[in-house]
């Protein structure tokens, strides 16, 4: 079994619709995060709808993922 397959077996994503953060490697070898709603998951691709729009992440590039709480509500601006 390859290292890539072992890593994917350890990463557990919630059901689509959950808010997640997914850390993955970009071609330069650096890691970046996608934060937003989990749209879909299959053997090859994870899709997250975040502030940068829909991000299609190759499953083999994912190094960590977890569900996160809903975004905090913005506080109303208080006049000074």
Image: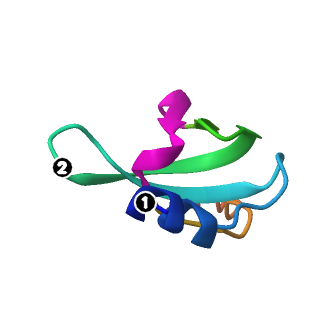
Q: How far is disc 2 from disc 1 in space, using C-alphas?
A: 19 Å
| Whether residue 52 is visible | yes
**Residue most extreme to the left:** 28
Q: Secondary structure at mark 1?
A: loop
Residue depicted at 65% across the width and 62% down the height: 75
Residue 58: % across, % down: 48, 37
Q: Are marks 2 and 1 in contact (CB under 8 Å)?
A: no
Reply yes or no: does residue 78 show up in magenta: no
Residue depicted at 46% across the width and 47% down the height: 60
Residue depicted at 40% across the width and 48% down the height: 61
Residue 64: % across, % down: 49, 66
Q: Which residue is mark 2?
A: 29
Residue depicted at 14% across the width and 41% down the height: 28
Asked where in the image residue 20 lies, by quadrant, the reply is bottom right
Question: Closer to us: mark 2 or mark 1?
Answer: 1
Q: Secondary structure at mark 2?
A: loop
Marks 2 and 1, the one that precedes in the sequence? 1
Residue 66: % across, % down: 62, 68
Front-most of residues 61 and 68: 61
- In the image, taking residue 2 as reference, residue 45 lies left or right, namely right
Asked where in the image residue 74 lies, by quadrant, the reply is bottom right
Reply yes or no: does residue 58 show up in magenta: yes
Q: Which residue is mark 1?
A: 2
Residue 6: % across, % down: 51, 67
Where does the magenta region start and end? 51-62
Front-most of residues 62 and 51: 62
Q: Assess disc 1: are there few (<14), some (14-19) or many (≥20) residues with their C-alpha within 10 Å of its C-alpha.
A: few
Above/below status of 16 relative to 9 = above
| Whether residue 79 is visible | no
């Amino acid at each position: 079994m390859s290292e890539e397959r072992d890593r994917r077996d350890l990463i557990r994503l919630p059901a689509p619709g959950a808010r997640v953060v997914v850390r993955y490697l970009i071609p330069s070898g650096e890691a970046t995060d996608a934060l937003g709603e989990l749209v879909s998951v299959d053997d090859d691709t994870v899709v997250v709808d975040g502030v940068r729009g829909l991000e299609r992440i190759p499953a083999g590039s994912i190094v960590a993922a977890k569900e996160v709480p809903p975004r905090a509500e913005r506080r109303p601006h208080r006049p000074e």
